[in-house]
Amino acid sequence: MIGNFLKSFGLNSFTKQESQFDDLLLSIEQYALSTEKYICAGQELSFANSSDYQQLKKLNSADKLEVLHVLVQKISSTEFFDDLGFKSYLVDIHLLSKLLRFRLQFPSGYSFLGLFNQLYKPNKCYALELTIPDRPFGHFVKQIESHVKLHGLDPTTSADINALISHPTLSQYTVQGIGKEYWGPDIGKAMNKLETLLFLHDKQLTPPYVLDGGALASILNKSLAELNFQEQNKWHVIFNHLSTASASKPNKSFMQAAELIIAQIGNDRYQAQVLEWITAIAKLKVPVEAGSAFIEQQYVDLLKGMLWTLSLYQDPKTLQAVDELVVVCFKKIIGKGAAAPSVGNAGIYVLAQADGVTGIKHLSKLKLNIRQNNTHKLIQKYIEKKATSVGMSTAQIEELSVPTFGLVNGKLNIDFAQYQLTIAISNVGKLETHWLTAKGRIQKTVPERVKNNDIFIEKLKVVRALCKQIKQTLSVQKNRLDRLYSENMQWTLSSFTKTYLEHGLLSQIANKIIWKVDDNPAMFVANTWQDVQGQTVEFSQDAKVQLWHPLYSDNSIVTAWQKQLAKMQIQQPFKQVYREVYHVTEPDISGQLSSNRLATHILKQHQLQTLAIAKGWSFKLLTAMGDRTGRGEVTKTFAEYNLTVKFFVNEPTTSGVAINESWIWQYVVTDDIQFFNENAECVNLKTVPAILISEVFRDMNFFVDVASIASEPLWTDDKAEKLQGYKDYWHLYSFGKLTNMAKSRKAMLENLLPHLTLSSHFAIEGNFLVIQGKMHSYKIHIGSAQILNKSNDQVLYFEPRKIALKFKRNTDSLLDMDSMSLAILSKAYALVDDDKIKFPSFLNQLSEF
């Protein structure tokens, strides 16, 4: 019987007795029936613990091939009339799937069409009509791929593939998005692979990839319409292959096949065309309406695969284009979240594959700009992997990857014939540009001769793109340096000079920061190190350099530095001289293992998550459904200290209220803060380094200050009453004691107010900024920015426009102001002219006085 069966595949009978393999298969089948409680089509069965299955795996290739044929015949001919018989049938299908994953060596001239026909031969006891997903078709195609790779595409195999592609049952699966079923890779992908085999080995035309509807399809179709039929076919082949990119990252076989197809198009031509496409896609407007899509679902895998292939090209232009598309992919759509996260992750993968540290600058920027928890972790994982591969810490590799952009001491001159464009980083850290004429005259606007010259216009576009990158990098590096406090970074003076002071861009940040050089606070000004009195100080090249923190100096030194920076008119890139300092308190010491100083605050949960991720922390939203503990944690690991910090939060005590449509709590209640060592043991707060205590509690206070319901001006009484007495919390926190962050804000305002043109209208009294308006007097709480009528403490609300502060001297604000400080000053300026405020709600409130 087996001899006749094998002849249908163009083979002779094997010498083994078929009963030997029958017994082997029967033993494996009985093992599965005795160990598996549930057996169904969509459930993967494991045969790993079966000794007979292990014996099957050790057979030589010819014997495995014979077992395959015996099993196929058994499946198509076995009769079953009860539940046990049907389960045995399903076990055989699972075993067939396993066999088709083995490395089988089919002989030359083998008929895969014959095997396909036998695979899908109806079993007379199986009432339902067989469909392609009822058998492991994807693994069957993989065997054809391996066979062609080993033997080439012989006439028999070519004919078989053509017959399969045109098979009426299979042709429906060549449509994108169809065929994602059981038994391995989806059928549509498998069909694409068969078409690719014919194109690569037999130069046959492939069916067009359907690009019908949507912005992406319009962009691609416009370019394809300019090509002849043969060239279009090459792109349809690569599209069919790229559309199989359903995994999280490409495997080796995907990239190898892609390279072969791209070679048919031409490497340079392919790169240029794909860059043109993804640049155009990145410029598409991301819809904000719920239910909208940025990339149509049927094209997501195509675009992912397209991005993956760009890992073959690692030039700056390609990496920048990928970077820009990734940013757009993580813009939010209402009710959906990120616009195209899987496409964005594909771009992140490409950036991570760049040689050396060239991709790190892009990953560092994205890490700060992307707010999704999982993506943030993915980026960090790629940076850590790259750092480990070159023997560095993540902090070291990030600082070494910063480009200079051709800047020298923060300046770059670009010639436009008799004009010269100067790009410079100003004393307050802003990027400024101006034009210099041949006569040395400075002008702000673009010269007419440049505007009217096509070559200059194109050059100017490149320069503007460069300026955009410089601005982005400045922002990223300011934030990165701010994080160094918790990363325990140190340099020798010689390495610090090379990495920072001689760097065209970083030098313009470093020279506005106070550094601790051999325990002495100093700034690098006018190419010399100066102390707080502005006196030159000398240090050896072996001196240790690290960021100075107010924690390291007494208050008189900190105040002296604040005055010195104001005198030099230096605006720091991040808050340093006015930085809040936190210590372990007596209640913390009594608690030993935890701190409750920030417990019982009510925070807006989604805003807490956004703030946490922006600061490098992780936080998973608490839901009001499913298996939950009612407790969550804002957490971050500080590798340099081998410590992990957890700020615990709880769901509100009243169930069924303050829940959004996704059953996520809108508010959470803060609990204690704990530090854990690498063995997950809670450590005594007194043993934690002071600098880490200060920085951790600074972040936590920031989360509370910004995300607290006290900062919500529209927190009405009826809303508060739903949360069992949280109204009292809102009033207490909105107008109560100042936090350390608010105290720092108060000190900044005390220094700033005398320099304002409207200073006579302002005064600081206790925890409030008092404003004398034309109609009434007001006071704004320095912690929450809430407004009170000074005469009767009635709460007032209006949302003013941002204002430009006016100073008595012609200078910018040189003090570091956070968003809350700007909100306070915007309200204060508007209240000076309270007779001009036109907000109806505010006017109604005033009419009650």
Image (cartoon, rainbow, N blue to C red):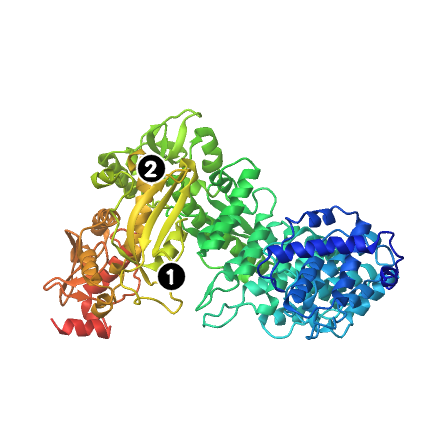
Which residue does the image show at 30% across and 41% down from the upper left? 577
Q: Position of residue 135 (x, y in %)?
A: 70, 65
* Figure check: 348 above or below 523: below
Q: Position of residue 804 (x, y in %)?
A: 30, 59
Give me the C-alpha separation between circle 2 and circle 1.
29 Å
The reply, left or right, for residue 336 in relation to residue 134 is left
Q: Position of residue 55 (x, y in %)?
A: 73, 47
* Figure check: 178 above or below 51: below
Which residue is at the far left? 791
The reply, left or right, for residue 355 in relation to residue 790 is right
Amino acid of disc 2: Val
Q: Secondary structure at mark 1?
A: loop
Looking at the image, which is closer to me, 149 or 580?
149
Q: Residues within 10 Å of mark 1 (few under 14, many from 20)?
A: many
Q: Position of residue 842 (x, y in %)?
A: 21, 71
Looking at the image, which is closer to me, 812 or 693?
693
- Image quadrant for the N terminus? bottom right
Amino acid of disc 1: Thr
Which residue does the image show at 16% across and 54% down from the upper left? 763
Can residue 147 be seen?
yes
Q: Earlier in the sequence, mark 2 or mark 1?
A: 1
Which residue does the image show at 32% across and 43% down from the upper left? 674
The numbered dot on residue 683 is 2
CB of mark 2 within 8 Å of CB of mark 1? Answer: no
- Image quadrant for the C terminus? bottom left
Q: Secondary structure at mark 2?
A: loop
Looking at the image, which is closer to me, 801 or 69?
69
Can residue 450 be seen?
no
The numbered dot on residue 457 is none
According to the picture, the residue beneath numbered tag 1 turns out to be: 623
How many dots with numbers? Answer: 2
Looking at the image, which is closer to me, 648 or 34?
34
